[in-house]
Amino acid sequence: MSEKPRILIVGTGGRLGSALLREYGKSAEVIGFDRQSLDLGNAETVRQVLQPVRFDVLINCAAQTNVDRCETERAEAWEVNAEAPKVLAEICTRQGAKLVHISTDYVFDGAKREPYTETDPAMPVSVYGESKLAGERGVLTSDPRHLVVRVSWVFGPDRTSFVDGVLENAKNNETVAAVADKFSTPTYTIDLAAMLRPFLTDDTSGLLHLTNGGACSWQEYAQHALECAHAAGLPLRASKVEALALDEMKNFIAKRPRYTVLSTAKYEALSGKKPRPWREAVAEYVSHCASRSG
């Protein structure tokens, strides 16, 4: 493989795909496909579009990530999250290329109370989790050289997420609330791009968990974001995040796992590095938001 690998990214309209397209484009030849240019719901179209393209590694960031929509649009979830990754794996194997498939912490049931490792059994509690797990298995069964990367609570500058919603809410309201009994790890797309980079071209395969360091509830995440925003001078009306219980969220259609913190011990052993703490990453992102709003 050349020193500058040819990287194909599927899902560049999303939060992570957009970040990877920009970050990797600084030092490699990168080709991007968003939902409009590549319909993952049509396997034959995917083959026709991608087979003529030459690449060394394909990163699949595309998914139906609306957890509640997956419950009501099961066929769509299965096509995009379960079937499409198998087709991408097949294309990569035929080209002699590596597939890096992005998956989720929602493959776990949340019953554990310590970080999930790559060897823990996956037992999803929603259609979203089930379809993503099926996608993982399809990729790894297709070719053991491929890599499945599980991430959690992804945020970043390219598309709004939970933290952006919290800040917007706090600008307009004196009270803000968030769930206090659901736990995972916020993961900054910029940090994720840097952590993932070495594994694009080496022989790391199988399952790998990549997140920022530490863990928190949605309430703790939101409270820290507000404190960072106040410190950065953002004009917010709210300063405290009230606690909600997951069971109170009657607008949720799908069941959510309560605890899906992912262990990064395997990443640390492979890289010799520890992920940046989520609090530092959120503080950097919020200061970025403040500079843009100024």
Image (cartoon, rainbow, N blue to C red):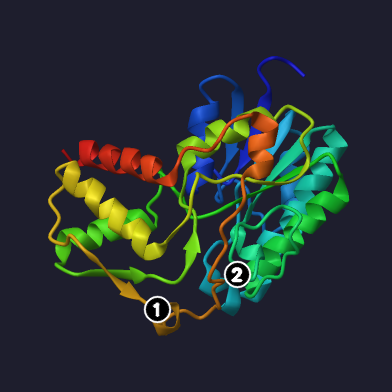
For the point 39% across and 55% down, the residue is 161
Give the mark, 2 or 1, whose residue is nearer the N terminus.
2
**Horizontal relation, residue 54 to residue 190: left or right:** right
Q: CA distance from mark 2 to mark 1?
A: 15 Å
> Mark 1, residues whose alpha carbon is within 10 Å: few (<14), some, or many (≥20)?
few
Say which of 182 and 35 sits in front: 182
The percent coordinates of residue 177 (x first, y second) are 28, 70
Which numbered circle lies on residue 110? Answer: 2
- Farthest residue in the top direction? 3
* Disc 2 and disc 1 in contact, CB within 8 angstroms: no
Q: Residue at x 86, y 44 (%)?
A: 144
Q: Quadrant of the N terminus?
A: top right
Total label count? 2
Name the kind of residue labelled 1 in the image.
Ala
Which amino acid type corresponds to the residue marked 2 in the rendered image? Gly
Residue 292 location (% of width, % of height): 23, 38
Numbered badge on residue 83: none
Q: Position of residue 279 (x, y in %)?
A: 38, 45
- Secondary element under disc 1, as helix, strand or loop, is loop
Residue 19 visible in the shown view: no
Which quadrant, please, contains the C terminus? top left
Q: Which residue is mark 1?
A: 245
Indicate left or right for 264 with 236 as reference. Answer: right
Residue 27 at x, y percent in the picture: 56, 19
Element type where label 2 sits in the image: loop
Taking the image as shown, residue 130 lies to the left or right of residue 292, namely right
